[in-house]
Image: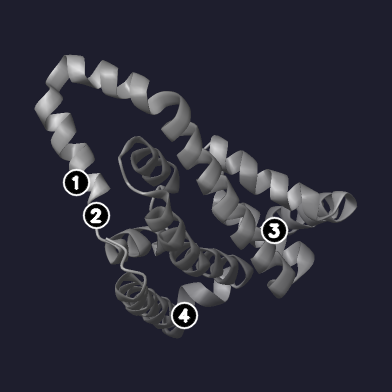
Amino acid sequence: MEYVDWFVQTCTSFLSQFGPIAGILLILLESIIPALPLSVFITLNMVSYGNILGFFLSYLTTILGCTLSFFLFRSTLRDKLYHFMQKRNHEEIERWMKNISHISFSSLAIILAIPFTPAFFVNIAAGLSKMHYRKYFFALVIGKMIMVYFWGYIGTTLLESLTDVAVFLKIILLLLLTYGISKFLEKKLQIK
């Protein structure tokens, strides 16, 4: 437990020294290097800057990082990968990409809201597919709000959350709320 306290104090001291730009850079770096722990960065932002500023800093930067990843794969690699993949098994890959392109808005929002979903792979798949950015963006806005809240809440109250069933019930409620909001927006904005 002493090591964890030392680690948190060292990281929060570092973040305090460089201000919010350090928290922003950590999350953007995680968007490029998926092996980095986004959950730890969100927790550190919330511990360093408070629940409100830490949440919004993490939330907006996560959306920005996912968007950058989406457009990186869309603009630089999509044509090359389609060309490469077509040489292999064209029908299977075409079917896979079509399924990704036509995933429902609600399903995409839920996938992005689930804290354990590897967002980097979702960003890659969406960027390589023919999914419209508007659909992806609104799903990000809804889904990442829940995901950032989850990691911030769990991270800042880790020991309590492991023994408190109410925390997990809140997360399930938030996922259901995400689904309801995404269904409403899907109809209202006519996103398919």
Residue type, numbered disc 1: Asn
- Of callouts 4 and 1, the N-terminal one: 1
**Label of residue 103 in the image:** 2
* Disc 4: which residue: 167
Which residue does the image show at 30% across and 66% down from the upper left? 106
Q: Are marks 3 and 4 in contact (CB under 8 Å)?
A: no
Q: CA distance from mark 4 to mark 2?
A: 30 Å
Of labels 4 and 2, earlier in sequence is 2
Rendered image quadrant of residue 5: bottom right
First of labels 3, 4 by sequence position: 3
Q: Amino acid at mark 2?
A: Ile
Residue under the point 50% across and 33% down: 72
From this view, report whether residue 156 is shown above or below residue 9: below
Instruction: Name the element at disc 4.
Output: helix
| Alpha carbon distance from label 3 to label 1 | 37 Å
Q: Which type of secondary structure does the marked residue at label 1 adopt?
A: helix
Q: Quick check: 9 left or right of 158?
A: right
